Amino acid sequence: MQTRRSFVGLAAVILTGGTALAGCTDSGSDIAQTSDASAASDGGGHGDMEHPMDGGPAPEGIAPAEDPEFPVGTTVTLTADHMEGMAGATATVSGAFTTTTYSVSYTPTDGGDPVTDHRWVVHEELENPGDAPLPDGSEVVITAEHMAGMKGADATIDRATEETVYMVDYEAVGMMMTNHKWVVESEIEPA
């Protein structure tokens, strides 16, 4: 009897954990990936794709910004709506970098629906990109793993910006996102 109760308790913990992890999918916004064209057209292309809670370190070779508007450790308000719960969220800057940042469109390598206007991928997250900035319409291969099916995907550059680009830590829909990649300076306000 005790063994059966332990098994039922364990099953409840596993089910609850699975439900919590399922909540990590983005159900309606715009930065990294999307699962349908209507979600992608909302301005960022993240849509219904899973996004890791820890974005990991900045890519090798990216230059830290020398005098960013929002230095590391600064509390800011996000105005970007790349993902559900992002717009209006309070965040802490975890990295500030000087590079070229791109909006890209691509088809995920895992068979997902095409993603349009994914914001953002930095120059250092492209395979052998050559000199920055790349012109709109350039064909590239993404080396970043911001979302499932992104790494190794063939992509097209939609547009580029030279704004300072930031990694941020913030809480959205009950989850803490650390080293979220990326938001550009025009998508941040003082807190």
Image (cartoon, rainbow, N blue to C red):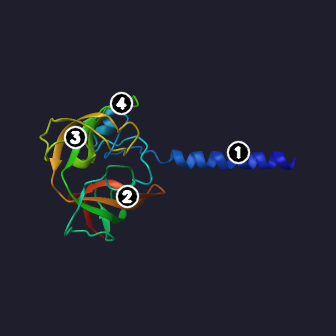
Q: Earlier in the sequence, mark 3 or mark 1?
A: 1
Name the residue that disc number 4 marks.
113
Badges 1 and 4: C-beta atoms under 8 Å apart? no
Residue at 36% from the left image edge and 46% from the top image edge: 146
Tell me the SS state at disc 1: helix
Res 122 visible: no
Q: Which mark is residue 179?
A: 2
Given the image, on which type of amino acid does mark 1 rest? Ala
Alpha-carbon span between mark 1 and mark 4 = 33 Å
Q: Which mark is residue 128?
A: 3
Given the image, on which type of amino acid does mark 3 rest? Asn
* Residue 22 position in % (x across, y down): 52, 44
Tell me the SS state at disc 4: loop
Tell me the SS state at disc 2: strand
Residue at 36% from the left image edge and 65% from the top image edge: 90
Give the farthest residue toward the right.
Answer: 1
Vertical arrangement, residue 88 with respect to residue 17, above or below: below
Alpha-carbon span between mark 4 and mark 3 = 25 Å
Alpha-carbon span between mark 2 and mark 3 = 24 Å
Quadrant for residue 110, please give it.
top left
Vertical arrangement, residue 164 with respect to residue 81, above or below: below
Vertical arrangement, residue 141 with respect to residue 120, above or below: above
Name the residue that disc number 1 marks.
11
Query: Is residue 87 found left or right of 52 in the rendered image?
Result: left
Task: Tell me if mark 3 has few (under 14), some (14-19) or many (20+) residues whose alpha carbon lies within 10 angstroms of its own.
Answer: few
Give the farthest residue toward the top.
Answer: 111
Q: Earlier in the sequence, mark 2 or mark 3?
A: 3
Alpha-carbon span between mark 2 and mark 1 = 32 Å
Given the image, on which type of amino acid does mark 4 rest? Asp
Q: Quadrant of the C terminus?
A: bottom left
Tell me the SS state at disc 3: loop
